[in-house]
Image (cartoon, helix red, strand yellow):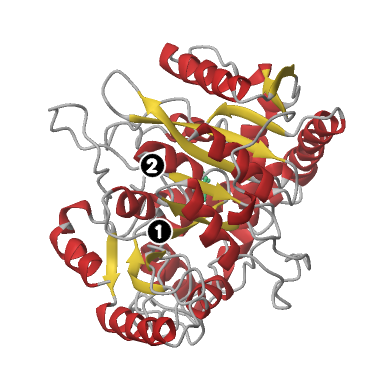
Amino acid sequence: TEACLGAIEGAGVLNAFVHNTPEIAMDQAKAADARIKAGDAPAMCGIPLGIKDLFCTKGVASQAASNILGGFKPEYESTVTTQLFDAGAVMLGKLNMDEFAMGSSNETSCYGDVINPWRRGNDEAKLTPGGSSGGSAAAVAADLCLGATGTDTGGSIRQPAAFAGITGIKPTYGRCSRWGIVAFASSLDQAGPMTKDVRDAAIMLEAMCGHDAKDSTSVDLAVPDFEAMLTGDVRGKTIGIPREYRMDGMPDEIEALWAEGRKMLEDAGAKIVDISLPHTKYALPAYYVIAPAEASSNLARYDGVRYGHRASLAQGDGITEMYEKTRAEGFGPEVQRRVMVGTYVLSAGFYDAYYNRARKVRTLIKKDFEDVFAQGVDAILTPATPSSAFELGMEMDDPVQMYLNDVFTVTVNLAGLPGIAVPAGMDKQGLPLGLQLIGRPWEEGDLLNTAYALE
Ligand code: GLN
């Protein structure tokens, strides 16, 4: 813990941590020492973690990287962080992210950009760590913490993990409680661990999972010992390669990486089959209707009354002006765009044409996966991202280009499936690239084991 706190002090330039909590960390570390001495040391005992700012942490600023939550210190602790701390984990501080987890580059944060610790050779250009869990990815990659919490609504664990050369898993929807995590798109949001490798991910995920009566979508299912399932044995497993993920203009390096991953699994004794997920091309448009629709509803609560920031008002301003001024000041441009898109697709005249249509597409995407799993496919191998980390500033003025970052990851959230990104090589510029494995629902243990075979 002391070493990590020192490393964080020295790495301010990355802007990964936005609130440091050294006193809490040292208290928790001492308590962990005592537990270890007493012979009661669970797997996470004394492990120093960074916590994404989207998680409510009791008495500690939790702003979802938004000005509208300025000054908000929750009275409660999220279920996932409670479980981690009960298992002995230590909180070093809160991690930067895209505002309300909306973004793919960590550039929508009220705290400013996070810098990826990776560089293109000797090039000084600053690269994005990806997003929205950009602070989590940078902090783990730069050894500022041993693991970090992330959340993933459309790829926010897996894309930054790929950009930073680390491992990140989004479990099946319902595995982790969403209670106490600031809501973005409730039917898609899931928490998960971001770590150095698959073994750490297995250990940390186990501590994060479990039923919670406070989240009606959390599942009441036993949590297996994920670490014990890491044998690396994938003999007899069937791995599907979806042809629709071979996109036009995909860089050769990504193609080559994908082929390499396929060969590694084949050499390890898995059977490789070509599969089709025919509705893949509708996933991104469906996601960018459903996610903003849910966001516009979830974000209605930030009204200047209940949480955080309230704009200063002029003489004669009424409650409408208070709402308008507070929300105009408090939300950044990307969040405002999502609220507007979401409000539009949910409005009476457009609900059927957009929102209901997107929900139907979502059902078809889910069915695509159910069909291939019914044919005996155990896991699906794809690239994690269509590129390596790009330069900060490159995609900020083109939201549609930015949304394309999620092309391989959003399907997994729409279908509620578990997905993992693992580091799988480098591009010509020396930047990390990741592969994604998508698993059957509730079979995170198997998925982690297949990923382990790729390490
Ligand atoms: N980049 C996607 C978005 O902006 C996904 C974000 C996420 O998974 N939280 O919506």
Up the image or down, 134 lies above or below 309; here it is: above
Which numbered circle lies on residue 147? Answer: 1
Identify residue type, mark 2.
Gly
Answer whether labels 1 and 2 touch (C-beta < 8 Å): no
Sequence-wise, which precedes: disc 1 or disc 2?
2
Up the image or down, 34 lies above or below 144; here it is: below
- Res 11 → quadrant: bottom left
Identify residue type, mark 1.
Gly
Q: Report the front residue among 417 and 300.
A: 417
Residue linked to disc 2: 130
Identity of the residue drawn at 40% across and 32% down: 398
Mark 2 CB in 8 Å range of ligand 1? no
* Residue 207 percent location from the top left of the image: 57, 67
* Residue 225 left/right relative to 255: right
Up the image or down, 71 lies above or below 405; here it is: below
Identity of the residue drawn at 21% across and 52% down: 14
Q: Report the front residue among 260 and 180.
A: 260
* Residue 283 percent location from the top left of the image: 67, 33
* Residue 17 left/right relative to 357: left
What crowding class fits label 1: few (fewer than 14 Cα within 10 Å), some (14-19), or many (20 or more)?
Answer: many
Q: Secondary structure at mark 1?
A: strand
* Residue 347 percent location from the top left of the image: 71, 51
Cα distance in 3D space between marks 1 and 2: 17 Å
